């Protein structure tokens, strides 16, 4: 249990990823308009015939790729968060996605991003394969993720499906100053923070232990609250 409390506070942002993920406005200029509709602001089932603008890369021990009908994030860099964005700009949103921890250490973190303004400014909604969760933010002027939980650390819940191969449905709500995280249809945490009011959405993953962690995201959907 203590490993998440100790190592989780050392979750650094992979700064050498910065060139792989542009700012919101840079990406919006080239964003295709084929990934909305059906009651959603944005949606992607990662059909290989459809391009919804996600940043892909292979560098520094991390890979973001669309393959076999999923968005796959792979990382072998302990303590660094890796992410990808589609290049959108929203205010209040509800984000849902289904995630499978395909392989790697169970001491990890993965989830979604909202109100991403730049590589240094965004909110993170994370769960782990060993049953932990947190809402955090990365803000310019800091060198690590700030967790917005009451004690500034990860919480623990049996609502999270655990272990390699487990599938979890993640729901993140960003409405006004209120940020909420749910898993598998059950609420985990709600916090308030006024720092960011709009920005891109995204997917993120990290491992806290040596080894290669692989996560597959599917059925990504952004709706109004």
Image (spheres, grey):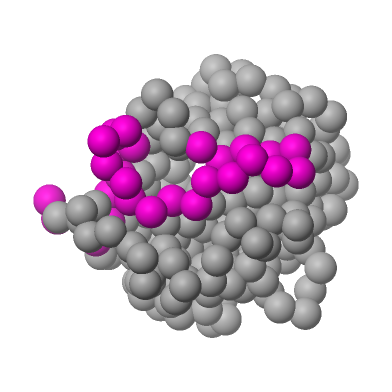
Q: Residue at x 65, y 62 (%)?
A: 19
Examine the image and state in which quarter residue 219 appears.
Answer: top left
Provide residue 187's location: percent of width, then percent of height.
44, 48
Asked if residue 58 lies in the magenta stretch, the reply is: yes
Q: Is residue 87 visible?
A: yes
Provide residue 190's location: percent of width, then percent of height.
51, 61
Above or below for 21 versus 66 = below
Secondary structure mostly taken by the magenta-highlighted segment of the chain: loop
**Which residue lies most toward the left here?**
38
Examine the image and state in which quarter residue 33 appears.
Answer: bottom left
Examine the image and state in which quarter residue 156 appears.
Answer: top right
Q: Is residue 186 visible?
A: no
Q: Is 136 displayed left or right of 187 in the figure?
A: right
Q: Is 38 displayed left or right of 31 in the figure?
A: left
Comparing 86 with 135, the one in front is: 86
- Range shown magenta: 38-65
Provide residue 112's location: percent of width, then percent of height.
50, 51
In which quadrant is the C terminus drawn?
Answer: bottom left
Above or below for 63 versus 195 = above
Provide residue 182's location: percent of width, then percent of height.
45, 47
Q: Is 119 displayed left or right of 222 in the figure?
A: right
Q: Residue at x 50, y 52 (%)?
A: 55
Asked if residue 35 lies in the magenta stretch, the reply is: no
Q: Is 63 displayed left or right of 92 in the figure?
A: right
Above or below for 1 versus 84 = above
């Amino acid at each position: 249990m203590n490993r998440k409390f100790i190592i989780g506070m050392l979750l650094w942002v992979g700064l050498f990823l910065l060139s792989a993920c542009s700012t919101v406005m840079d990406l919006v200029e080239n964003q295709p308009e084929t990934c909305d509709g059906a009651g959603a602001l944005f949606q992607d089932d990662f059909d290989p015939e459809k391009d919804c603008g996600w940043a892909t890369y292979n560098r520094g021990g991390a890979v973001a790729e669309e393959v076999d009908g999923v968005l796959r994030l792979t990382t072998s860099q302990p303590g660094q968060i890796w992410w990808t964005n589609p290049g959108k700009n929203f205010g209040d949103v509800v984000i849902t996605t289904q995630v499978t921890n395909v392989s790697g250490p169970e001491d990890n973190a993965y989830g979604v991003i909202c109100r991403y303004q730049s590589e240094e400014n965004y909110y993170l909604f994370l769960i782990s394969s060993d049953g932990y969760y947190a809402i955090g933010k990365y803000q310019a002027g800091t060198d690590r993720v700030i967790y917005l939980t009451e004690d500034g650390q990860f919480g623990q819940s049996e609502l999270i499906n655990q272990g390699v191969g487990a599938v979890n449905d993640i729901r993140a709500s960003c409405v006004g100053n209120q940020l909420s995280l749910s898993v598998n249809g059950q609420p985990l945490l709600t916090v308030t923070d006024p720092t960011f009011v709009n920005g891109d959405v995204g997917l993120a993953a990290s491992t806290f232990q040596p080894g290669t962690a692989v996560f597959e995201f599917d059925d990504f959907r952004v709706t109004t609250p």
